[in-house]
Amino acid sequence: MQTREYTVLVVEDDEDIRALMVDFLRDEGIHVAEASDGAQALEILDAYRAQLDHLCLILLDLMLPRVSGIDVIRHIRGRGLDIPVVALSASRNHLAEAMLAGANMAVAKPFDIEEILSVVTSHYPQDQS
């Protein structure tokens, strides 16, 4: 029986913040894909199209170059995809807009990395077989 590799997608344009989240999650044994902007996130979503059940969560910064996080959420929901999205931003207005666009949760920056881990583990399947 083939093992299913569940993935969390981290979308963050700030290289230091993205590296912190990715490294921390990987250290916890979580499989992570990463994108540095909204357009790259959409490319990854297209690549996962055949295996979207493997993509269990998206951690999404809202202030991104090329394609905004809000537009990424609209793309996801416009295609009827049921992937949980956690919006990340220092702007309460952007977080509110993300929730209206279809985000499942909003986390204000700066965030505590343990809070992110808690959110991820609540969405990450425990049985990967």
Image: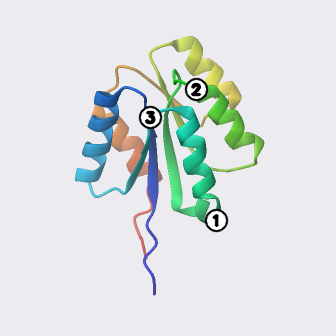
User: Image quadrant for the N terminus?
Assistant: bottom left
Residue at which label 1 appears: 50
The alpha-carbon separation of the residues under discs 2 and 3 comes to: 10 Å
Q: In the image, is residue 22 above or below residue 61?
A: below
Q: Nearer the viewer, residue 85 or 64?
A: 64
Quadrant hosting residue 119: top left
User: Image quadrant for the C terminus?
Assistant: bottom left
SS for dot 3: loop
Q: Is residue 27 left or right of residue 57?
A: left
The answer to whether any part of residue 57 appears in the image is yes
The alpha-carbon separation of the residues under discs 2 and 1 comes to: 25 Å
* Identity of the residue furthest to the bottom in this view: 1
x, y (%) of residue 43? 58, 46
Of circles 2 and 1, the one toward us is 2
Answer with mark 2 or mark 1, whichever residue precedes in sequence: 1
Q: In the image, is residue 72 above or below residue 26?
A: above
Residue at which label 3 appears: 36
Residue at which label 2 appears: 66
